[in-house]
Amino acid sequence: MATASTPAVPESRPYHHGGLPLTLLAAAETVLVRDGIAGLGLRAIAREAGVSHTAPRHHFGDTTGLLSDLAAVGFQRLRDAMLAAMDGVADRRERRHAIAHAYVHFAHDNPALFGLMFRNEIIDMRRPSLSQAAKAAMQVMAPTIGEAPSAGADALSASDAMRVTAAWAYVHGLATLLIDQRLHGVLKASPGFRDPLALVDAVLENVALAAEPASR
Amino acid sequence: MATASTPAVPESRPYHHGGLPLTLLAAAETVLVRDGIAGLGLRAIAREAGVSHTAPRHHFGDTTGLLSDLAAVGFQRLRDAMLAAMDGVADRRERRHAIAHAYVHFAHDNPALFGLMFRNEIIDMRRPSLSQAAKAAMQVMAPTIGEAPSAGADALSASDAMRVTAAWAYVHGLATLLIDQRLHGVLKASPGFRDPLALVDAVLENVALAAEPASR
DNA sequence: TGTACATCAGTGAACGCGCGTTCACTGATGTAC
DNA sequence: TGTACATCAGTGAACGCGCGTTCACTGATGTAC
């Protein structure tokens, strides 16, 4: 494809689009944010992109293909957000907090996209682009959360595996309860928090995970 | 309705069903388990119940009404499971563990139903039957998890609100990551756990939440 | 004890909708010679 | 430098599908008198 380097786009829309795949992903996100996951069909996305409704098929095959790639974009952005939050933070505990904060706030700021990233009915985690993006995002968490930082995420001790799982579940649970609006009950029982996000932020500040001795 | 006490059901199906609402809820769960959330339409449910596809409308109004009631049944069962797990357990820490274990295993055993209970697009949390069932389930957790057990769930101190939120998020995250099959990556990096559920059980045994001083 | 009638519960045909899929096509690009 | 041709990218009409909704209806039940 010699498209990215073509000097200029002709004034009247050319027959060949040039960068349809990226345009379709952007259109899909627009539809997702506007109409929610229910509105995410190939026809609706093509309509949003101003293109024939059979065009997406050339690039993505089917709806699952397109949405899986969109979910992959989501994981890349989540990873970037966590990396940016950690940047320059030396203290280990601070880094952990920065990651958790970034995870929850990413979900809060992109609720529809975050939801899509975990909707197995309409995306396919076996697609390489998606599984790799998801793995890359998780590999940002593992070294910071585990005990043996250098190990990376390809070989975890049992206790590190438990730490990583627990930490991920903790922030993931906060994120999903937050964006699914399930915290209003707690908020009503304990006024003083401005809104659900404030409650979640306070939780992240004050309640940490602690590996405890096996004898509980 | 003088249905529950009618002596016997005539051999040839009577025109009036008698207990259609309950039958429809059961049919909906059958469809949900068999075809997933995507298959949950009024027509499919009526078909499963062996009844005209407009009949559900008399009792539930629309799809959201029926599914919201099914989600309410789910919350009732979750509550029952947590109560049963706590039954006779005196130690506070053991009770906490029992609740968490019950929560995660309920999700594991009823993944489709659990998923429905948190799908805001197709259920309506404002319906009284659903919001009450959800609240009742949460009120099983709150007194055991907070510091001031007698307070119940209607008035929580700020620190209890944080504890409850954190504990709920923790088990909820474990449950969702588990049933969404997101733990395979961790499992691959750390063999030795039989399967994702074994990993989650180990996490529940060994990693607890700890409220820490505000200075992190 | 019987009769009339309103109300409730369930039926089945019909409609319109948006969807995914198929198909024959056309416009544009790249490559072989 | 030009020509022929294969391939790629996108079009638009058509089809079938399951869905929710509307409608006139029928069978059964409860209640007033």
Image: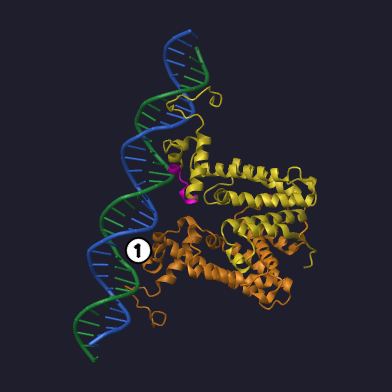
Chain colours: A yellow, B orange, C green, D blue
Q: Nearer the viewer, residue B120 or A138?
A: B120
For disc 1, the marked residue is B54
Considering the whole magenta stretch, tell me its main secondary structure. Answer: helix
Looking at the rendered structure, the kind of residue marked 1 is Thr
Q: Count the numbered circles shown.
A: 1
Q: Is residue A146 visible?
A: no
Q: Residues within 10 Å of mark 1 (few under 14, many from 20)?
A: few
Q: Position of residue A118 (x, y in %)?
A: 58, 51
Residue at 66 percent of width and 60 percent of height: B197
Whether the magenta-drawn stretch holds residue A41 is answered as: yes
- Chain of the residue where label 1 is placed in the rendered structure: B
Q: In the image, is B106 to the left or to the right of B88?
A: left
Q: Is residue B97 above or below residue A42?
A: below
Q: Position of residue A167 (x, y in %)?
A: 71, 55
Whether the magenta-drawn stretch holds residue B187 is answered as: no
The boundaries of the magenta stretch are A37-44
Q: Which element carries disc 1, helix, strand or loop?
A: loop
